[in-house]
Amino acid sequence: MTMGSALSTRRRAVSAPTEAEHAADGLSLILPPGEIIDMPALAAALDAAVGCENPAEARGACVALLRAAKDGAHASIAAALEARPFAGPLAASSYAWVADRIVCLAITTVQERLHPLPNPTACERMAVLAVGGYGRAEMAPSSDVDLLFLTPYKQTPWGESVIESVLYILWDLKLKIGHSVRTVEDCLRLGREDFTIRTALLEQRFLMGERALADTLDTRLWKELFSRTGPEFVEAKLDERAERHRRQGGSRYLVEPNVKEGKGGLRDLQTLYWIAKYLYHADTPEELVEKGVFSEEEVATFNEAESFLWTVRCHLHLISGRAVEQLTFDMQVEIAARLGFTDTLGRRAVENFMQVYFTHARAVGELTRIFCAMLEAQHVKSRPPLGPRLRRAFGFGRNVLPEEFQERDGRVDFAEAADVAAEPILMLRIFQVSLNVGMLIHPAAFRTVAANLDGIESLRETPEANAIFLDLLLNTNNPERALRRLNETGALGAFMPEFGHIVALMQFNMYHHYTVDEHTIQAVSILSRIERGEMKVELPLASDIMRQGIEREVIYLALLLHDIGKGRPGDHSEVGAEIARVVCPRLGCDDSTTDSVEWLVRHHLLLSDVAQRRDISDPRTVQDFARIVQTPERLRKLYVLTVCDIMAVGPGTWNNWKAQLLRQLYDATRAYITGDADPLSRRDRVEEAKAALVAEYSKHTGPEAVAEELERHYPSYWLGFDTETQLLFALMDEDILPDEIYSQVIPDQARDATKVAFYMEDHPGIFSRIAGALALAGANVVDARCFTTTDGYVTSAFWVQDNQGKPYEKSRLDRLRRSVERTLKGEVIAGEEFKVKDKVKRRVKDFTVPTRVIFDNDGSEIYTIIEVSARDRPGLLYDLTRILSGLGISIASAVVATYGEQAVDVFYVKDLFGLKLHSEAKRRSIEARLRAAIDGNGTPK
């Protein structure tokens, strides 16, 4: 094998490095080459160390020296990146340069010292090529090293020995090696059959060996494969991209994005590069300017996005110590600190960092759209469907484009004579025209809009512009597309600067899945789908409300503005209401519409909070909520807004449990406001519940047993459980023995939960024991009620979900019941188990969740409500209830809500004498003990 290094990377080739860059072998490095690896010294050390005759010793000496060189080089690059944290591309080139040196030295050592062959025959001359990301000379610290051993003919025994020895050395160095041994014919055949292999060959880069063989492969690839299959390759890569996006969640605005594979990530840029190289033989983004694909500004955007993403990826690998590609919450905090981001007013450093990340991800999407449209224009990629164009052609004058616009490559563009600088209103009208005629907007038009955002800013106070904006929101039948296109070009933020503040803004919590602007657009999209009748099954009540008629302008604007106060100091609902008070008149809304929008924005969390954090069966809850809402029309709008808001949080957030809670509160409040509610007194409702049980229980037993059951329970029991649950407890009582625990686990599909009912003799702290038992079994409590009987028993019902927020499958119910009973019988000690489980996971340790303890003596007629908000963790409900029980507090019911890393536990309680907690000193003492338990230093042993 003829040895030598002939690096010829194209994408990162430099003619003259800047003062902060260092060139070597055609690459820009983060340090001078000698400060990364002292090649003369390493080569000399290898010569001396592997001179022994024992091959095993020689290989061991080679591995030791190369490992020390690799580790030292990686440490030097990491230190340089720490000193220059935004130099990710230089670090990526440097890691590839190090891999080149190590691979070439390993091959040289094997060929010259372990398997010397002074006169190789023609079939023993091979070439070694880098392929994949390594072929592009782009490597993160833990990237794979993909090698192609190219042979002229069938492999020889000597060649097999060389390759095997090289691979063993590289594996001993803990490099992740991908390798293949192929002839030129193999490469051509496999490249035709497999697009992944074809893509890897597209990026092949000669390392060492028989250069003529590598040149033959390159020439034949271009002549016999690449040049003939452009459209086929483009469609395959774009299909592959679409499938990858689907696997990664379908949005570039996921709050824990995959830097490499996610939408708007590095793989999207690499896909553009692959296609550009395949079609145009372009090795750099700059060459696409010459081809007329990108403008110079767009190439600058490409390079900035690529640089930032590579920077993030390199830091991600270094922090984790392995090939991690997902930018998880804990990694976001560390990388933000490394890059020098700081807290600002209303935002954490990590949120500022992620806003920059998502801005670049959006830019990647815009570049992809421009590139794909250019491919369509050149007939390389399939064009949009002909349907809309045919309808226009035979529409007898309908949907004809206004004279300021033209059809270009099946898309809407500005007419040649259009002057957007003189008539900036055209930049809003093109979005309106596009939706009206059913055509996409041409990338050239997007470029024009993006380059003239100052013109859009001048339209903010213009009645015509505001009328167009409202038309896009209300009358296009696809407000999502309108808002998304406006947002991705920057036009939405330019026209409505208040919205621009939340563009690409991440909410640093585990509850929201998307950035604020993406969440908002998805909420508007859900509302539009409801209005079109597409969600009758999932959202029957909201669909009915929209079908019956609602002030559309109010509800659409309220959704658009509901989170617009985020990222600013203060309560975002209050801040957002103040912003709505400014924005709505500017859009041309009258006072009534403005007032309604402002009220909805201010109270957009009210329905959700009350439904999920209060006992809806308590009449006082409904009365207090109704006093705020006041009118049925407000209630209708608030319900629809709340449903859209929750559904837009992310997949799986909306479920039957939330649906039932919201519907129950909506129905009760509507009845109260309209006067349709049955004005029964508390005593009347108790008697009504007793009568219902009599009707059901009489089917199972005689009058004496029924009468006895009616006398065993206090009034709160009759109002706290439905008839089905009361019957269950009555039947349990018939067979229970002293000291026995009866339990039943019952699916409650209507609530997307599993009901676990317990019946046993009463003991102090029983609520806490059950909560601990359920937590140890892995069950998440979402609702609970507990009542004692006059003869010393306790009836408890807990509604639980599994760790996926779903009801337990039938196959797991018996296991859940047995696990809980083991704890209740003392076979497992909850407190000891939680000591092991109570560590905060690394992924969530950086979340800031303030602890709040609120006492409310007005929200219920007979109970004090204690609301505790804190970081969620295993056993939190157990700790809180154990503290309360230890203080002599009787818990009648608990309502539990979880928002990602935040838990809100609400307890309806009385003191030892059955009274509310009126003493301020007593409440302060309880709060102190609860806070101590939450902090982990006050839980009773």
Image: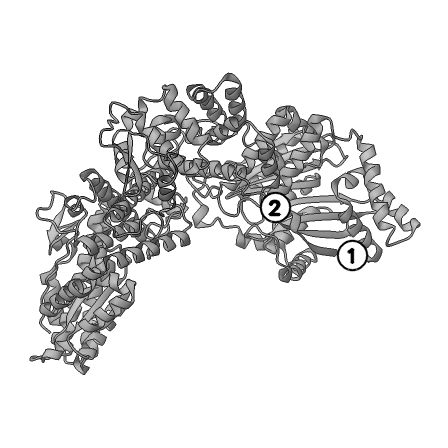
Quadrant into which the N terminus falls: bottom left
Residue shown at 64% from the left, 38% from the top: 663
Q: Residue furthest bottom?
A: 157
Q: Closer to us: mark 1 or mark 2?
A: 2
- Please determine whether, in this image, residue 738 is positioned above or below residue 251: below
- Check disc 2 and give the amino acid type: Asn
Label 1–label 2 contact, CB within 8 A = no
Residue shown at 62% from the left, 58% from the top: 809
Q: Which residue is mark 1?
A: 739
Quarter holding residue 126? bottom left
Q: Residues within 10 Å of mark 1 (few under 14, many from 20)?
A: few
Circle count: 2
Q: Nearer the viewer, residue 635 or 902?
A: 635
Between the C-alphas of marks 1 and 2, the distance is 36 Å
Residue shown at 64% from the left, 28% from the top: 625
The tag on residue 820 is none
- Check disc 1 and give the amino acid type: Asp
Q: Which residue is mark 2?
A: 656
Q: At which x and y percent is residue 8? A: 12, 58
Q: At which x and y percent is residue 217? A: 15, 67
Residue 375 shown left or right of residue 821 in the figure: left
Q: Nearer the viewer, residue 690 or 743?
A: 690
**Residue 621 visible somewhere in the drawing:** no
- Please determine whether, in this image, residue 237 is positioned above or below residue 446: below
Q: At which x and y percent is residue 608? A: 58, 35
- Please determine whether, in this image, residue 750 is positioned above or below residue 503: below
Determine whether the residue tagged by mark 2 lies in a helix, strand or loop.
Answer: helix
**Residue 250 visible somewhere in the drawing:** yes
